Amino acid sequence: MISLEQPGSRQDQHGLERSISLFQATVYGVGIILGAGIYALIGEAAGLAGSAIWISFVIAALIAACTAISYAELSALYPKSAAEFVYVKEITGSPFLGFVVGYVTVLTGIIGVAAVSLGFSSYFKLYLGADPVLVGIVLILSVAVLNFSGIQQSARVNTLLTFVEAGGLIFIIFIGIPYVGEVDLLAVDSQSAIGDATAWKPMMAAAALIFFAYQGFEDVVNIAEETKSAETTVPLALLLSLLITTVIYILVAVVAVSVVPADALYAASKLDNPSEGPLALVASTALQSPMGGKLFTVIALCATANTVLVLHIVNSRMLYGIARDNCLPGFLAKVNPKTRTPVGAVVLATLLCVLFTLGGSLGDVANLTNVGVFLVFFMVNLMLVMHRYQNRAAENPRLTSLSLALNLGWFPLLPFLGALFCVLMLFTQFWQPMMVLGVSIPIIVYAFLITSLALPIYLLSRMHQG
C-alpha cells in the first residue's frame, strides 16, 4: 500500500522536490507553448485569417506579453504552486475569490489537455485510423503515469520532446524559406486584405483562437515550489520562453501559408480528414515527397504529447496548491513520499481531462479554453494593479526593467493594457463560450461551501477525539 502524508509535516522529506533549474524551467515553458497551438491550431486559424495569419500571431503575442509582465512580477512576490489562486487570495484577502479564480484556472487547464489531446489525434490519424477521442484518452492516461513517477522524470521527458518539437518547427522554417514571397502575406481572403474595413474581424477572431497557442508561459509559475531560486528563476524563465516561441511562431506562420494555401491548411486540421495534419502537409508539399509529411507527423505527435504532459503536471499542482490552503478536500494535498508527487491531485486531474476529451471538437474545446484563460489573465493583471496601488508608497526592487520603463507613476501600464485586451476579447469574440462556462459558477459556489463546512467539522471531530 502506498503511504501518503500531509504536506507541511516534515516538508523537507515529503514536500515537493525543489530541483528545476533555469534551463529546465525555460525549456518547460517553451515546450508547453510550442506544442499547445502551432501544431494543433494553425490550420483552424488559417481558415479565419488567410495568408495574413502571421499578423494574428503578432497580435496574440502582444496581448500575451502584457500579461507575462504581471505574472513575472507576481511570481517573484509569491513563488508558490496554485499561483493564480495565491495571487488573488493574498492581494484581495478573500479565500473565496481566490478559490473561484483557482477553479477557473484548473478547469481551463483541464479543457486545454482535452484540446491538445484531440490535436494529437489529428496527426495520429495518418498512421492508424482509430477513434480520435479514444486516442486522446490513451495519451492522457499515459502522461498521468509519467506525472506520478516524479518531477525529474517528467522534466527529462519534457526536455527531450521540447528539442524534438522545436527542431521540427525550425525544419519547417528551413524548407519553407524558398517559398516566401509567392503569396500575398497581407491577404485575409480573396475579397479583403489588411487595410480593408472588413479585414479586422477575421484577424481578431484568428488572434483570439491563436492565443491558445501562447498558453503555457503562465504555467511556469506553478512549478515555483519545485524550482531552484524561484524568486529570480521563474520570472526570467517565463519571459524567455515567451520571447523564444513568439519568434518561432511568426516565422512558421509566414512559411506555412507560403507553401500551402490557407484553405488547404484549414482542411488538413479537421479530425475527419484522412490526410496528414496541417504542418505535416507543409512538409510533404515543400519536400515534394509524402515521406516528409510522415516524418513531420512523428515530430508533431511528440510536440502535442509534450504539451499534454506539461499541462497535466500544472493541473495537478494547481489542485494540490488549492487543497493545501484548505479550499479543496485534503486528499488532494497529500504527497507520495517516494515519488514526491501529489497522487490524489494527479488522479483527479486525469479523470477530469478524460471527461472533457469526450467532447471531440478541437475548435470548440480550444475556444472554451480561451474563455477561461482570458478570465484568469484579467484577474492576474488586475491583481498586479491592486498590489501596486496598495504599495504605491514603497519601492519594489523586484520590478522588471520593462515594467519600470512603462509605469505612469505607481500605475502599471502594461498590466492595465493586458486586462483591457482580455475584456475586449471576451466580449467581442467569446460571448457564446462565456455562457457555457458560466453554467459552472453554481458548481464553484457549491464546492467552496461544502469544503468550507467540511473542514471545521473535521477539525472539531479531531479535537473531540483528542
Image (tube, rainbow, N blue to C red):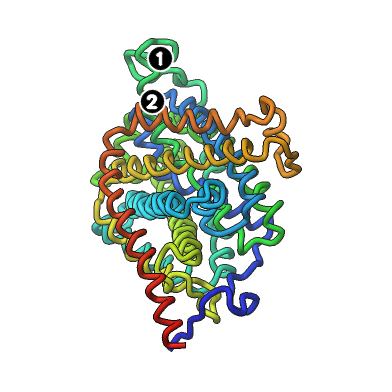
Q: In the figure, 255 relative to 136: above or below? A: above
Going by the numbered disc 2, the residue's amino acid type is Ala
Determine which quarter of the picture holds residue 164: bottom right
Label 2 Cα crowd, 10 Å radius (few <14 / some 14-19 / many 20+): many
Return the residue at label 1: 193
Q: Residue at x 57, y 42 (%)?
A: 170
Residue 17 x/y as whole percent = 61, 70
Q: In the figure, 239 relative to 179: above or below? A: below
Q: Is residue 9 left or right of residue 1?
A: right
Label 1 Cα crowd, 10 Å radius (few <14 / some 14-19 / many 20+): many
Depth check, front residue: 57 or 183:
57
Q: Residue at x 29, y 43 (%)?
A: 438
Residue lying at the far top of the rendered structure: 196
Residue 433 x/y as whole percent = 29, 39
Q: Which label's residue is closer to the chain start, 1 or 2?
A: 2
Q: Residue at x 58, y 78 (%)?
A: 9
Depth check, front residue: 419 or 21:
419
Return the residue at label 2: 49
Element under disc 2: helix
Q: Is residue 388 left or right of residue 395?
A: left
Going by the numbered disc 1, the residue's amino acid type is Ala
- Label 2 near label 1: C-beta < 8 Å? no
Residue 173 visible, this angle: no
Between the C-alphas of marks 1 and 2, the distance is 10 Å
Residue 40 x/y as whole percent = 39, 45
Determine which quarter of the picture holds residue 136: bottom left
Depth check, front residue: 195 or 95:
95
